[in-house]
Amino acid sequence: MWNRVGVLPGKYSESIQQRWRTVSAMRRGPEPINWRWDPPVAGLLTVVAVAGAVGAPSEEAVIDVPSLRTAGLALLVAASLSLVVRRRHPTVVAVSGALCAGTYFLMVNDNIAAAIPAAVGLYTLSSQGYRIRAVAIITGCTTVALITAVVLSGDPEPSIQRTLGRTGWMAAVMIAGEVVRYQSQLLSQARARAVEAELTREEAAGRRAAEERVRIARELHDSLTHSISVINVQSSVALHVLPQRPAEAEEAVRHIRSAGQDAMRELRSTLQTLRISDTDANPSLSGIADLVRRMGDVGMTVTLAGEEVALSGEADVAAYRIVQEALTNAVRHSGAKRVRVDLIPGASSLTIVVGDDGVGADEVTEGHGLTGMRERVTALGGSLKLNRSSIGGFEVRAELPMSPVEPSGGEAHRDQDPVGR
């Protein structure tokens, strides 16, 4: 039974499905960074923020109350340490960092180092895709800072300028986070496409292998079932009549030998056909000469006449498959010794004629090979005729358009009925 990815069940298909799940996860976005680095990074940023806030010269606070400075430093330390959970709770960390920075600027001094937790929080928020939240935090904090500067400061102009400058820096940090997120998504999607392409190739290879196993089993079944059944029946007869009627037993043994010879011929023919098909990984009209040469190695005299023309991709493959199927039928069914392949280019189409000197059209019954050939030709808007060959056997005549044509909906017709192989 085929599963959803198109290969037979088993460890191979389970591996493919697991990798498809990986592709889906990669398409959703980049994998999260290992959180074990967040505590040491948060500790380092805490040291930098506190050292910068305490050691660097700065403007006086809007509310200059010395007793509140210790509380402001404590808030700065708390906001910096909250960066440990910035990936799990980015909104909480960004808001707390912004509130801490605003409070510090208001009560302690105007040192930009106090904005480090807020900047890192906004960067994390934006890099995780929460752009609107980041904009809302920046807008809210800027509005509160401007109102505070106007209401509480005796000379609001310097405070307003510093507030707008800090807003610009926070906006730049948010944009940097957005750019990093976008680049990470592009990289993740590129990796997903590469893995998906590889998986698609593996699935196609798995399907081809499974289909080839089924085809070989069918070919061997068709070629050997009858002969083996005859051998089984005749051997039973020989065992039954041997004591009383040795002459009949001898006749049964002759039938067994004949059936065995037939089975060997069928098996050899089937293996030759499979060997021919196995080399056709990229079928096209340009490969027909090599196909004809290989058929000559089988022991059949094959003549190729005509010239190659430029066909569309599907027509190019169809032309090759038509010749291949016709030659295969000549090997397996007609008992032909000679085959002629003609490629006749027209104004807008290519006519392919394959005729042999084996069994004539009236003696052939329709099978899967010619049915598939007929479907190929009809799908391309061409026509297929099955006739007696001019050299006495069976002839396939297919006309293919040089460029794709919408099929008319009619079936390809036959000149003789019943025909096909």
Image (spheres, rainbow, N blue to C red):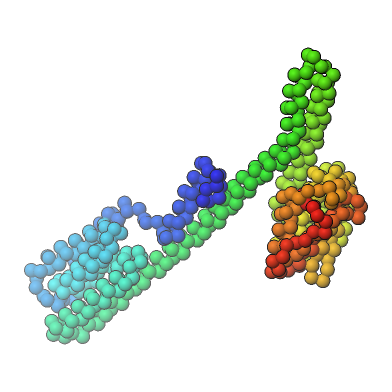
Residue at the top extreme, as displayed: 243
Quick check: 177 left or right of 187? Answer: left
Q: Is residue 116 visible?
A: no
Residue at the front extreme, as displayed: 244
Residue 415 vs residue 185, the one in the foreground: 415
**Image quadrant for the N terminus?**
top right
Quick check: 193 left or right of 33? Answer: right
Percent coordinates x, y for residue 125 in the rendering: 31, 66
Q: Is residue 60 above or below residue 352?
A: below
Residue at the right extreme, as displayed: 391
**Residue drawn 76% across the image and 46% down it:** 276
Q: Is residue 95 visible?
A: yes
Quick check: 97 left or right of 249? Answer: left
**Residue drawn 27% across the image and 60% down it:** 89
Residue 411 vs residue 164, the one in the foreground: 411
Residue 261 vs residue 386, the one in the foreground: 386
**Residue drawn 23% across the image and 60% down it:** 82
Percent coordinates x, y for residue 118 in the rendering: 26, 68
Percent coordinates x, y for residue 126 in the rendering: 34, 68
Q: Is residue 296 above or below residue 93?
A: above
Q: Is residue 49 above or below residue 37?
A: below
Percent coordinates x, y for residue 190 in the rendering: 50, 61
**Residue drawn 15% across the image and 67% down it:** 72
The image quadrant that residue 130 belongs to is bottom left
The image quadrant that residue 300 belongs to is top right
Quick check: 100 left or right of 19? Answer: left
Exactly how many numbered labels are in the figure?
0
